Amino acid sequence: MENPDVLVVGGGPVGLATAIGARRTGLRALVVEPRPGPIDKACGEGLMPGALAELDRLGVRPHGHPIAGISYHDGSHEAEHRFRGSPGLGVRRTELSRALHERAAESGVGVGAGRVVGVTQDARGVDAALADGSSIRCRWLVGCDGLHSGVRRLAGLEAAAPRGGAARRYGLRRHFRRAPWSDVVEVFWSGSAEIYVTPVDDELVGVAMLGPRGLVFADEIARIPLLAEFLRGAEPAGPLSGAGPLRQRVRAHASGRVLLVGDASGYLDALTGEGMRIGFAQAAAAVRAIAGTVDTPLAELSGWNAGVRAAASYEREWHRASGAANRFTAGLLLASQSPVRRMIVPTAERMPGLFSAAVEVIAR
Ligand SMILES: Cc1cc2nc3c(=O)[nH]c(=O)nc-3n(C[C@H](O)[C@H](O)[C@H](O)COP(=O)(O)OP(=O)(O)OC[C@H]3O[C@@H](n4cnc5c(N)ncnc54)[C@H](O)[C@@H]3O)c2cc1C
């Protein structure tokens, strides 16, 4: 492909969604990703209704298992909310990757193997250096390279990690061959971890857990008799995978012609399970910021101006796309790391209206 308008660094779900969205506005888009597809990742694999709606808008329709809502359990208490509108979908990450790649190819998105190791920009564009010594010139570079984003660091957008190990949380995930026993994502709250069970297929459930460093997967399951009983005799399907530390901070979400989208743009926690919904909303915001700027003749005349305008527009849109959900996640995270933790599920049970309203915030 000749020099792309938009170079997307990272072929995870948010990177591919960004590239497909960019193509839909007529921009030439190229994705570079070092790993061969379909790509897997430690994830709860629940696509909230809002994430599904955005994928549908892009023409991406993965196979999965419908999710009717979310339930919380702590052994003595439980609360359940069933989504008010359309359902969500539990989807294996490899299936999501397949469906996104298929749509990307149909849309004319270029996908190439490569790892970006250098980023420099000038008034008219960005040069990305690849690990094999080659480079790609583009007008806009979108960093969708995940939690440990190199683009974020290379563009000077990384902020210092929060102090203190207590705030550091990690994720683990494993699949089990077993028919789902519920049509909702079940979240089990133990003393220090949250365990998510997502139906992803007729004969497969994903079990993801979040908590401090050193979580032992089997021990955490054994601590929850109801869950241990459900999984008794179920064969693990695939390896145990992990991610973290989850919390990643940024100074800003864009610098000139370099924009950060998805986990690369800063991350709080997977506690509320809506990372992909927010990532897809940010992807759409980035495409709008770029397309809106490129189309302005004045911006074409002054390259730096275009970068500054797109960065400012994206910064505003990023907050619009992510703000409410991030505030909710921050509040729940704070409560979950305080003595209030043991009150979370009982409160959700006692106040179903509040629980429902909260789930609807993260769902759409
Ligand atoms: C335990 C856990 C459970 C979760 N559960 C859910 C859930 O149920 N629902 C939900 O919506 N979200 C969930 N999330 C969050 C979700 O997984 C992320 O928000 C989502 O994967 C973000 O997608 P992304 O494309 O931004 O990043 P990623 O999926 O991490 O993709 C980044 C890609 O960039 C590539 N890359 C990295 N460096 C470079 C480089 N230098 N050059 C080129 N490419 C590079 C990587 O190989 C990777 O493929 C969960 C997260 C965790 C940890």
Image (tube, rainbow, N blue to C red):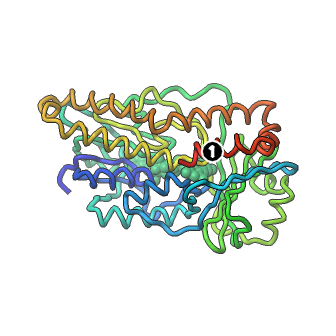
Of residue 217 and residue 361, the one placed in the foreground of this image is: 361
Q: Residue drawn 46% across and 56% down?
A: 53
Asked if 146 appears above or below 167 in the picture, the reply is: below
Circle 1 — which element? loop
Residue 245 visible in the current orientation: no
Residue 294 visible in the current orientation: yes
Q: Residue drawn 73% across and 36% down?
A: 336
Quadrant that contains the N terminus: bottom left
- Callout 1, which amino acid? Thr
Residue 21 lies, in percent from the top left, at: 33, 52
Residue 203 lies, in percent from the top left, at: 66, 74
Count of marks placed on residues: 1
Q: Residue drawn 39% across and 46% down?
A: 283
Q: Residue drawn 39% across and 30% down?
A: 316
* Image-based side of 65 in relation to 219, left or right: left
Q: Is mark 1 within 8 Å of ligand 1?
A: no
Residue 231 lies, in percent from the top left, at: 78, 66
Residue 230 lies, in percent from the top left, at: 80, 66
Task: Residue 319: name its quadrant.
Answer: top left
Of residue 269 and residue 297, the one placed in the foreground of this image is: 297
Task: Residue 199: name its quadrant.
Answer: bottom right
Of residue 360 and residue 6, the one placed in the foreground of this image is: 360
Of residue 133 and residue 185, the one placed in the foreground of this image is: 185
* Image-based side of 204 in relation to 124, left or right: right
Label 1 packing within 10 angstroms: few (<14), some (14-19), many (20+) = some
The residue at which mark 1 appears reads as 272
* Image-based side of 315 in relation to 268, left or right: left
